[in-house]
Amino acid sequence: MGISKPRVETSSLAPEPRLVVRPAGPEDLASVMRIERTPGFEAFVGRSEAAEHRAMLAAPGFAYRVAVGADGAPVAFAILSGVADPHGNLYLKRIAVDPPGAGVGTAFLARVIDEAFGPLGAFRFCLDCFASNARAQRAYEKLGFTRDGVLRQAYRLPDGSRSDLVLMALLRPEWLRRGAAV
């Protein structure tokens, strides 16, 4: 399922910058782990060990996507779960960009959203993010996600403290109204 070849194009939701987004392979896992372990990300981005990443990458219900820079190295990744869910629910398990704040994240997420509702056939694309991550929530809202609720104290941080998670979702009809790339 999904795209099989890299595509160079822009999304109708976030036209710049131009990105190459492609399915990730085992050769990309070191870059994925490097990005999710960027200093300062520990309070905003979940982490998985190599064995867990390999298992998810190989599982039919997961899809990994990477955006690559001019040198061909991944600068962003997304992990989707629920691929082929019979109810059309797709979950954005994780997304991260290095460096943040350069505009790549929003453009990358727009491409992932287009694929979620296009080739992956989702009806509902949902995610959760740390309640303290206002930057991410603004980016998700900019792309049409709405807040569905809060999971109180649902995530244990590396230091043992707990964080609330904000639930957000975007529905296919909402995506279509925004002028999605179909």
Image (tube, rainbow, N blue to C red):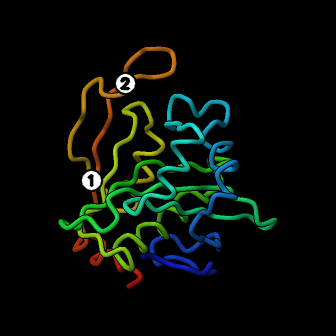
**Farthest residue toward the right?**
71
- Give the tally of numbered discs: 2
How crowded pointer 1 is (Cα within 10 Å; few <14, some 14-19, many 20+) is rated as: some
Query: Where residue 22 sits: x, y (%)?
Result: 59, 71
**Farthest residue toward the left?**
87
Residue at 50% x, 78% y is 3
Label pair 1/2, CB-CB below 8 angstroms:
no
The N terminus lies in quadrant? bottom left
Query: Where residue 182 sits: x, y (%)?
Result: 38, 85
Q: Measured along the vertical axis of the image, is residue 91 above or below residue 182?
A: above
Residue 118 vs residue 166, the one in the foreground: 118
Residue at 46% x, 48% y is 94
Secondary-structure class at tag 2: strand
Residue at 51% x, 42% y is 52
* Residue 155, numbered circle: none
**Farthest residue toward the top?**
160
1 or 2: tag closer to the N-terminus: 1
**To which residue does mark 1 refer?**
146
**To which residue does mark 2 refer?**
163
Q: Measured along the vertical axis of the image, is residue 87 above or below residue 44?
A: below
Residue 123 vs residue 62, the one in the foreground: 62
Residue 174 vs residue 70, the one in the foreground: 70
Q: Measured along the vertical axis of the image, is residue 42 above or below residue 23?
A: above
Secondary-structure class at tag 1: strand
Of the residues shown, which amino acid type is indicated by label 2?
A: Ser
Query: Where residue 75 sits: x, y (%)?
Result: 68, 56
1 vs 2, front mark? 2
Marks 1 and 2 sit apart, C-alpha to C-alpha, by 20 Å
Instruction: Name the image quarter holding residue 23.
Output: bottom right
Of the residues shown, which amino acid type is indicated by label 1?
A: Thr
